[in-house]
Image (tube, rainbow, N blue to C red):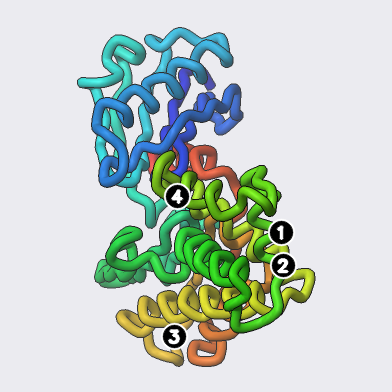
Amino acid sequence: MTGYLISLEGGGTRSQAVLMDLSGRVLAVSHSSDVNTNFVAFAQAQQAVYSAVQEALQTGGVEGKAVEHFISGLVGPRFGPETFSELCPNAAYRYYNERDVVFARAGVYRPHGVGVVAATGATAWAIRADDGRQSACGGWGSLLGDEGSAYAMGLLGLRATARAYEGRAALPTRLVEGVAQHFNLTYENFHRGLVHLAYQKPLSRAEIGGVAAVVTRLAQEGDPLASRITAKVAADLAALGLHAARSLFTPAETFTVAAAGGLLNAGELILAPLRQGILDEFPQARFLLGSEAPAIALGKMALYDLGK
């Protein structure tokens, strides 16, 4: 099957472009910076996606004029022919959203159920395939919400680390050691160094979210304070998913719950409360973990919709 497809996906942490042929074979994958225009300038986001698409075409050895379909699923902006007409002059554009990507990563192309993303931010959606009703919760960003997210965990972890450094932690912890190693700080310059990173650099949402990996690693090793923080964020995520499920489904119904996002790399510490919370109230629900790369999954969903 001749012809090519570009699939572009991105949000508040990074963006990703994939070049595929129309049989679904992946020819090239490229990455660039974040594109959520709530947090980065429009021009910066536009340059990021342009660079990602350009690199995918170059790596795959395909001329842009051979691209028939341009698929976009970005959190925030919608870039189309005004940005890519020179690169892909013959492409037809098709747009998706973050909810579609979550379901697609679990291989669900006709969703009837709940999608939960736990990445730098956290959002949950519910959608019914039978009557078209939809609802969403979360996704308010770092100032107004994002409970259940990597950002929320990273911020809790950093604040707990500051208290632990002064001996004010509520529980024993190795967070100071873990955060110092994460940011390449010494104990002697820890206070000055962390304050400088937080306020003078300053730390980005993605960098704060990156501290979640330190917290969950220590929690897996049994650190009491890291375990408490992880349990709190996991409970918040489970509550978000449950609220979405309750908005459109009854306990007797069968539906899919698809979950995806980097925070879920922590495994059962995060997944178990979400899964169990859903199944306790909705025993007929089917829980799926979305593991396929976002832009690849989005491209496959588009091919399904196009009947390829």
Q: Amino acid at mark 3?
A: Glu
Label located before the other in sequence (4 or 2): 2
Q: CA distance from mark 4 to mark 1?
A: 17 Å
Disc 4 packing (10 Å; few <14; some 14–19; many ≥20): some
Among the 4 quarters of the image, the one containing residue 267: bottom right
| Residue 139 drawn above or below residue 20 | below
Residue at x-position 71% and y-position 59%: 177
Residue at x-position 38% and y-position 27%: 49
Which labelled disc corresponds to residue 174? Answer: 2
Q: Amino acid at mark 2?
A: Arg
Q: Amino acid at mark 4?
A: Ala
Q: Which residue is mark 4?
A: 198
Asked whether 220 or 80 is in front, the reply is 220
Asked whether 160 or 279 is in front, the reply is 160
Q: In this rendering, which labeled residue sits more in front, label 2 or label 3?
A: 2
Q: Amino acid at mark 1?
A: Glu
Q: CA distance from mark 4 to mark 2?
A: 20 Å
Q: Which residue is mark 1?
A: 177
Q: CA distance from mark 1 to mark 3?
A: 47 Å
Residue at x-position 34% and y-position 22%: 47
Q: Given contact means CB atoms under 8 Å apart, are the residues at marks 4 and 3 in contact? A: no
